[in-house]
Amino acid sequence: METQANKGLYVAEVTTLGGRNGHAQSSDNLLSVHLAFPKEIGGNGGATNPEQLFAAGFSACFGQSLSFVASQRKLPVDVRNVRVTTRVHLLAIEGGYGLAADLFIQVPGVSREQAEELVEATKTVCAYSNSTRGNVRTTYRVIEG
């Protein structure tokens, strides 16, 4: 049963064919990308990979969520100026593979202390932060712009 707390807002549907050396296509055809193993792990490179796509999603979600939190606190943060760089690490772990993520966040228009408070609050709002908590080692660092 769907409650207000877990109400579905949107469903993204993407189909891949060929795994990491294949192709990914969204059901609305807005995403259509070739995939390739990165050169760093023995692939040919030349195309995006799942880790880059995950990093893009995490960065975008965190930046938008931070802007939302700032607006709730009436702080002068313009989402167009919030820069989030996310590094997603593919890890060899016992029995398989895992991920880790490092986010570097620049928040122009507020003090470093305010930016750090916004980042802490955003961790509980961002869908990616909520979904990775306890599953993916994630670090968040405010950096000066």
Image (spheres, helix red, strand yellow):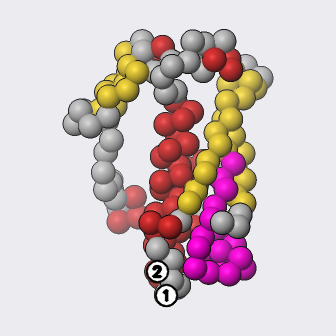
Give the image location of residue 118, x and y in percent: 61, 74
Q: Position of 49 compared to 112: left or right?
A: left
Q: Quadrant of residue 109?
A: bottom right
Name the residue located 57 percent from the left edge and 12 percent from the top edge. 44
Helix, strand or loop under label 1: loop
Taking 51 as reference, is 109 above or below it?
below
In the displayed orientation, state which residue is furthest to the left.
28
Q: Which mark is residue 109?
A: none
Give the image location of residue 12, x and y in percent: 33, 41
The disc labelled 1 sits on which kind of residue? Answer: Lys
Q: Which mark is residue 74?
A: 1
Q: Position of 99 compared to 33: left or right?
A: right
Q: What segment carries the magenta color? A: 102-120
Q: Position of 30 compared to 106: left or right?
A: left
Disc 2 crowd, CA 10 A, few/some/many (<14, 14-19, 20+): some
Name the residue located 56 percent from the left edge and 60 percent from the top edge. 83
Give the image location of residue 107, x and y in percent: 60, 70
Q: Which residue is mark 2?
A: 71
Give the image location of residue 141, x and y in percent: 72, 60
Taking 17 as reference, is 98 above or below it?
below
Per the model, the C-alpha gap separating discs 2 and 1 is 5 Å
The disc labelled 2 sits on which kind of residue? Answer: Ser
In the displayed orientation, state which residue is furthest to the right.
94
